[in-house]
Image (spheres, helix red, strand yellow):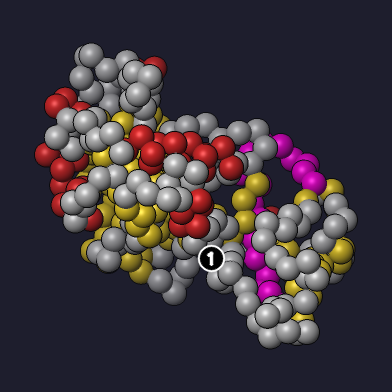
Amino acid sequence: MKYITVILMLLSLSLLMADPVIYPTTTLIENFGATWCGACQFALDGLDVIAAEVPPAEIIVSRLLTESGEYTTPEIDDRFDHYEVLGLPAVIFNGKVRVDGSGDGIADGSLYHAALNNYRYLGSPLKMLMPSFDPASGAISVSVELLNPAMSIQNASLIFYLVEDHISTELTNVVRDIVVQDLNLSYTGNAQVFNADFDVAPSWITGHLRALAFVQLENKAVLQSVSSLALPQNMVQAALPFDNNIQGEANVQYESPHFLIYNLGNADTFTRHIEVLSAPDDWYFNYCDADGNCYPGSIQSSL
């Protein structure tokens, strides 16, 4: 069966759009396991494959351990209960898409790749930044801005994770402490700043500590997340206001809505092109910018 033979993709630069109501989604990946769980190594291998496939800062990986001595706290076990995690490993993407077990498709990352594709390039109504994080004291500050005037968020949670990397050759991305705050948001046109304090043990290596924060709804969906890790120099992300899995009738041209491309790095010029990850051989792509300049998908354009 053939799907769409031509796709016209309309690209709009965020700097040309007034008051965008979406922002690129950073996907939170929560890996639930234990130090004694031998099968959990398959999950670690698969997540390493995913981390190598996507640009830095598109995903945030955290590892939560149960029944694992000093690496387990009541707050961490609460997260296992929150998702009703009974078998290990369990890897959950943005609170909603869950991949259990260690069978086929885990170590090679293919099942994780399919789960991640639900969120790559997805637009979020929230913009989150982390103005400050002091790993020595545990003090953290996070700003959250609701971009859509037609929305409000009620009975949500703002959750902070303190993560330690490179504890040993086997242990990294390990959640050490969790702080949870109630969150209600209405549109104000400005970001709201929230502060928290982690409990930092003297034995933890300060230089290995990082922080992340995310907004989670009552239905467990994670709307947005942010990390203390620095963004790379070149960091471009899309924010789609539509499903990124497009299907249609044969010999029908599909014209997408405008979507936003954000330059989140420091570089002020970049080159864009369409990279076809999965499509039949007879598909063809064009794209147009906000000025009406259109290009075949195989031609690069500099901005």
Magenta stretch contains residue 270? yes
Q: Is residue 265 shown to the viewer in this render? A: yes
Span colored in magenta: 255-271
Is residue 154 rendered to the left or right of residue 84? right
Is residue 56 rendered to the left or right of residue 72? right
Residue at the image point whose x is 36% and y is 69% from the top = 152
Classify 66 as above or below 29: above
Type of residue at label 1? Val
Q: Is residue 177 shown to the viewer in this render? A: no
Residue that badge 1 annotates? 21
Percent of width and height locating residue 165? 37, 25
Is residue 287 rendered to the left or right of residue 246? right
Magenta stretch contains residue 179? no
Q: Residues within 10 Å of mark 1 (few under 14, many from 20)?
A: some
Percent of width and height locating residue 169? 38, 19
Percent of width and height locating residue 287? 79, 66
Depth order, front residue of 294/55: 55
Picture quadrant where residue 195 is located: top left
Classify 261 as above or below 130: below
Query: Of helix, strand and loop, which one carries label 1?
Result: loop
Picture quadrant where residue 234 is located: top right
Picture quadrant where residue 227 is located: top left
Is residue 68 rendered to the left or right of residue 8? left
Residue at the image point whose x is 42% and y is 47% from the top = 106
